[in-house]
Image (cartoon, rainbow, N blue to C red):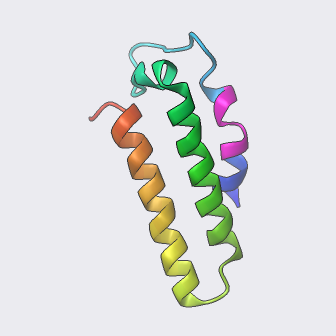
Amino acid sequence: ETISTLTDRMADRFPKGSNPHPSESLSAIWTNWPDFMRKVSDLKTAADRLRRAQTRSEFAAAFRDVGGTCRSCHKAYRQEK
């Protein structure tokens, strides 16, 4: 539920021109905004499925999807540590 709620405010966390340095965020967020927001939307969908899961297999599948969406966004838009 928390992840789903946070995705609703994701655009507010990355307003245009807010690329602070040093930061873990890559400037690709702002140069490829539509893709970034698509990944946020995918995360919300996966998080909502996780929240509604009623069986162990539904939970496992949704949990993998949440992890995959997080990973895809971090791979594209977050600096490696």
Q: Residue 19: where, in percent of width, then height?
A: 49, 15
Q: Which part of the image, by quadrant, shows the C terminus?
A: top left
- Compared across the picture, whether 59 is left or right of 23 comes to right
Report the residue that reaches farthest toward the top: 17
In this rendered view, identify the residue nearer to me: 67 or 20: 67
Up-down: is 32 above or below 71? above
Q: Does the magenta stretch include residue 64?
A: no
Report the residue that reaches farthest toward the left: 81
- Compared across the picture, whether 47 is left or right of 63 comes to right
Q: Give the range drawn in magenta.
A: 7-12
Up-down: is 72 above or below 68? above
The residue drawn where x is 71% and y is 61% is: 1
Q: Residue 30: where, in percent of width, then height?
A: 51, 19
Q: Residue 54: where, in percent of width, then height?
A: 67, 86
Up-down: is 58 above or below 18? below
The residue drawn where x is 49% and y is 79% is: 60
- Compared across the picture, whether 19 is left or right of 7 comes to left
Up-down: is 25 above or below 58? above
Q: How many labels does the image show?
A: 0
Q: Residue 15: where, in percent of width, then height?
A: 63, 19
Dominant SS of magenta comes to helix
Q: In which quarter of the image is residue 40?
A: top right
The residue drawn where x is 57% and y is 82% is: 58
Q: Quadrant of residue 50?
A: bottom right
